[in-house]
């Protein structure tokens, strides 16, 4: 079952410069940078109440984030919804007709299990399902 919005992922070219902007906006400190090797990204997060703003910088030219920025520029990359059982949720979502980009969860930031749904099946919004 989807429980809540977990985070909003924002693709950025320069993580440190973006952290400065959001530090001023939110008046709080972000997490330390985390490299997520499997996703080819570097991430820092701002916790805001129950939600998180996740700043994501590519660590290689073939990273999905690098490709996103080349095609669309910096900005909102995805919305992530937290589930208490990602495997069951993916089965349910696929049975409802949504197209999965990941049929099996992968490892994301904070060692979360993550899987993405194709934007063409979610109203043009890249959607992530995650489980802590």
Image: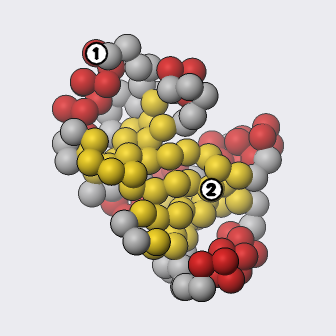
* Circle 2 residues within 10 Å: few <14, some 14–19, many ≥20: some
Answer above or below: position of 28 versus 105.
below
Secondary structure beneath label 1: helix
Q: Quadrant of residue 21?
A: bottom right
Say how the picture is coloured: secondary structure
Q: Which residue is mark 2?
A: 10
Which disc, if any, is residue 87? none
Q: CA distance from mark 1 to mark 2?
A: 29 Å
Marks 1 & 2, CB-CB < 8 Å contact: no
Percent from the top left, x then y, of residue 76? 64, 50
Say left or right for 84 vs 38: left
Q: Which quadrant of the figure contains the C terminus?
A: bottom left
On the question of residue 106 being in view, the answer is: no
Percent from the top left, x then y, of residue 125? 57, 34
Residue closest to the eye, 78 or 106: 78
Percent from the top left, x then y, of residue 95? 28, 15
**Residue lying at 24% horizontally and 24% vertically, measured from the top left:** 92
Residue closest to the eye, 103 or 18: 18
Secondary structure beneath label 2: strand
Q: Which residue is mark 1?
A: 95
């Amino acid at each position: 079952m989807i429980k809540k919005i977990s985070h909003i992922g924002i693709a950025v070219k320069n993580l440190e410069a973006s952290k400065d902007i959001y530090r001023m906006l939110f008046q709080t400190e972000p997490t330390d940078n985390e490299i997520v090797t499997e996703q080819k990204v570097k991430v820092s997060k701002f916790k805001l109440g129950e939600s998180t703003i996740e700043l994501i910088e590519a660590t290689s030219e073939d990273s999905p984030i690098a490709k996103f920025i080349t095609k669309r520029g910096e900005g909102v990359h995805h919305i992530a919804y937290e589930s208490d059982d990602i495997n069951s949720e993916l089965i349910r979502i696929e049975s409802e007709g949504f197209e999965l980009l990941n049929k099996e969860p992968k490892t994301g930031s904070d060692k979360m299990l993550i899987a993405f749904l194709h934007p063409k099946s979610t109203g043009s919004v890249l959607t992530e399902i995650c489980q802590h």
